[in-house]
Amino acid sequence: MSSSPLFDTLRVLQWNAGGLSQSKRAELLLTLCEKDIDVFTIMEANLTTEKLKYYSFKGYSLYVLEKSRQAASGILIGVKRELTTDFRIIKAMGADNVKSEVEHGCLDIWCPF
């Protein structure tokens, strides 16, 4: 018995949004649906973990590297739930007891081709 893979391609979207307003979120949702995007990264999303609860994307697991300064910063990552993922902060730079200015995240995705 032959089974077909869930994915034959992996579609990735990267967007420097300069802040993720509700209107930009609506535009993003439309693009995710129309283009059948599997993984997206939104640069300068200006989100914190606390604010993430207001930004659901049906069918996607969401991860965030929080904004670290007043100007546009932070990264929102979305991965289709059908994909197996592991996300973790691998390096936070900064002095002890001082909030990091730069964080590095690692996202592993397993896609059954």
Image: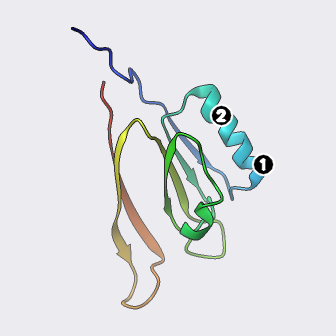
Mark 1 = which residue?
Answer: 23
Picture layout, residue 5 above or below residue 76? above
Q: Is mark 2 on a helix, strand or loop?
A: helix
**Residue sitting at x 38%, y 60%:** 105
Query: Quadrant of the image for the C terminus?
Result: top left
Q: Mark 2 near mark 1, Cβ–Cβ under 8 Å?
A: no
Which color scheme does this rendered protein use?
rainbow
Residue 88 x %, y %: 35, 61
Q: In which quarter of the image is residue 92?
A: bottom left
Q: In which quarter of the image is residue 73?
A: bottom right
Residue 81 x %, y %: 44, 40
Residue located farthest toward the front when viewing the structure as drawn: 1
Residue 49 numbered tag: none
Q: Which amino acid does label 1 sit on?
A: Ser
Query: How many marks overall?
Result: 2
Residue 31 numbered tag: 2
Viewer-nearest residue: 112 or 90: 112
**Residue sitting at x 53%, y 33%:** 37
Q: What residue type is labelled 2?
A: Thr
Of the image marks 2 and 1, the number of the one nearer the N terminus: 1
Residue 11 x %, y %: 48, 31
**Residue sitting at x 66%, y 76%:** 70
Q: Distance between the residues labelled 2 and 1?
A: 13 Å
**Residue sitting at x 32%, y 14%:** 4
Query: Quadrant of the image for the N terminus?
Result: top left
